[in-house]
Amino acid sequence: ITTDEITAMFTEAVSLQRTKVFHELEELWHPYKNGDGVPFWHNTWTNKTQWTPPYDPTNFDPHDIDIDVFVELMQEKMVLPASPFVKLLEKDPLELWAD
């Protein structure tokens, strides 16, 4: 795997992470309007409301990824089967670390 391929995979993983977080936020925060048409947000987990928007999609820019996003992407890209380390998976740990 080249450095450019690693960079491209990380960029894709960050994009997947952003999509995942936005999906979770949309499930957590539901927008409503009061009788005067003023928007407010309800948190389904805490059952509380607030007047200010809970997050700003234009300012949200993750620079890290969760392990589940990493594993999902590595499986999708078939990184492990293409790795020279895959042969080690068949070995008994005692063969690899005798002491």
Image (tube, rainbow, N blue to C red):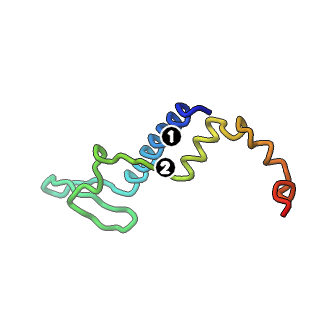
- Residue named by callout 1: 10
Q: Is residue 92 above or below residue 14?
A: below
- Residue named by callout 2: 65
Could you say where residue 42 lies in the image, as x and y percent from the top left?
30, 60
Q: Is residue 6 above or below residue 43?
A: above
Residue in the picture at 49% in, 37% down? 12
Q: Is residue 18 above or below residue 99?
A: above
- Sequence-wise, the earlier of marks 2 and 1 is 1
Tell me the element at label 2.
loop
Q: Image quadrant for the C terminus?
A: bottom right
Which class describes the residues within 10 Å of circle 1: few (<14), some (14-19), or many (20+)? Answer: some
Q: Is residue 35 left or right of residue 93?
A: left
Looking at the rendered structure, the kind of residue marked 1 is Phe
Q: Is residue 94 left or right of residue 82?
A: right
Measured in 3D between alpha carbons, the distance from the residue under mark 2 to the one under mark 1, in whole angstroms, is 9 Å
Residue at the far left in the pictured view: 36
Query: In this view of the protein, which residue sits in the foreground, 67 or 49?
Result: 67
Residue 47, by quadrant, is bottom left
Q: Is residue 24 left or right of residue 48?
A: right
Could you say where residue 9 lies in the image, as x and y percent from the top left?
53, 37
Tell me the element at label 1.
helix
Looking at the rendered structure, the kind of residue marked 2 is Ile
Query: In this view of the protein, which residue sits in the foreground, 83 or 22?
Result: 83
Could you say where residue 22 lies in the image, as x and y percent from the top left?
39, 48
Residue in the picture at 45% in, 50% down? 64
Could you say where residue 39 lies in the image, as x and y percent from the top left?
20, 54
Q: Are marks 2 and 1 in contact (CB under 8 Å)?
A: yes
Query: In this view of the protein, which residue sits in the foreground, 94 or 38?
Result: 94
Which class describes the residues within 10 Å of circle 2: few (<14), some (14-19), or many (20+)? Answer: some
Query: In this view of the protein, which residue sits in the foreground, 75 or 7?
Result: 7
